[in-house]
Amino acid sequence: MDYNKEKLGLGNYYIGVVNWGLITMVKKEKNMLTLDDFLMIIHNPLRRKILSKIVQGRKYTLQLARELDTTQQAIMKHLQLLKKYGLVECVEEESPEGPKRKCYYPTKSFVILISLQPNIFDEFFFVPQSDLEDIPEKYRAYLEEIRKIGETEGRDAIHFAERIIHSIQQELRALHDEEKALLALLNLAIEMGKAKALAHDLANSDEITVAFYASSDNRDEEGDDNDEIHEI
């Protein structure tokens, strides 16, 4: 994933990422959106562009139509669907040019990731929670820095926030690079294991079946046919 393409807003902060599968580990609640729902919603390029705009701040339909070079009718059609699924809401704001206008803003955050390569298919999906108590100790310094933003005024506060965001983005890129390296090592280990299992099978008269399964969510304990969905 290209983290350089992320759009981060200082108001409504939102990150959309993608790795696909903890939907099997999320307890399904009433009216809770599933991974399939999200994929249906974001598969449309214009809807993704609309979301990329409104996560930076509230936008009204004419503004979105101008920025995305399309019609207000097209924008409204997609905003209505996003609102239907609870991804956006609207609020009326005063307009300097006439009557009040409806401005749209995001109401949900979610992370979707899919890892697809030889020997590995892994899905990851979750809705980020704002439980600051679970932040690892090594990232606590960021929390203190973020709290200092509230003690800073004017443009200094904005520059301070931008510096912190840039630093956290660098941490995310480093983690992404580590993940790619570990996945390469995992794939190599699986290939070596399969080769050794085949050699062992050919060298022995007894039939031997060896199965390799790679997944971060330990779904082998549940089985693919288990409809019960477990809470993270």
Image: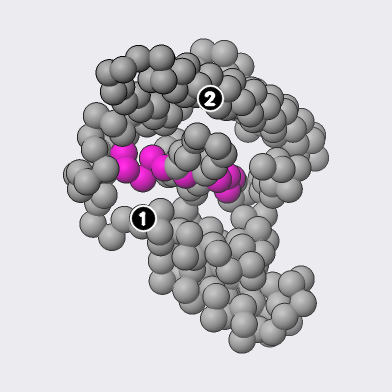
Q: Is residue 90 in view from this perspective?
A: yes
Question: Which secondary structure, mark 1?
Answer: loop
| Residue 31 covered by magenta stretch | no
Q: Which residue is mark 2?
A: 191
What x and y, as percent, mark residue 32? 31, 56
Rendered-image quadrant of the C terminus:
top left
Residue at the image point whose x is 77% and y is 77% from the top: 69
Q: Is residue 174 above or below residue 104?
A: above
Give the total number of marks visible in the rendering.
2
Q: Secondary structure at mark 2?
A: helix
Location of residue 192 with respect to 80 vertically, above or below: above
Kindly identify which numbered label has been placed on residue 222: none
Q: Which residue is mark 1?
A: 34
The quadrant in which residue 176 appears is: top right
Magenta span main SS: loop
Q: How far apart are labels 2 and 1 at the CA level?
A: 33 Å
Which residue sits at x=28%, y=60%? Answer: 31
- Part of the protein shown in magenta: 14-25
Q: Position of residue 27 (x, y in %)?
A: 26, 44
Compared with 140, 47 (above or below) is below
The quadrant in which the N terminus is found is top right
Q: Is residue 136 left or right of residue 31?
A: right
- For label 1, the crowd category at 10 Å Cα-Cα, with few meaning under 14, some 14 to 19 and many 20 or more, is some
Left or right of residue 202: residue 226: left
Comparing 71 with 63, the one in front is 71
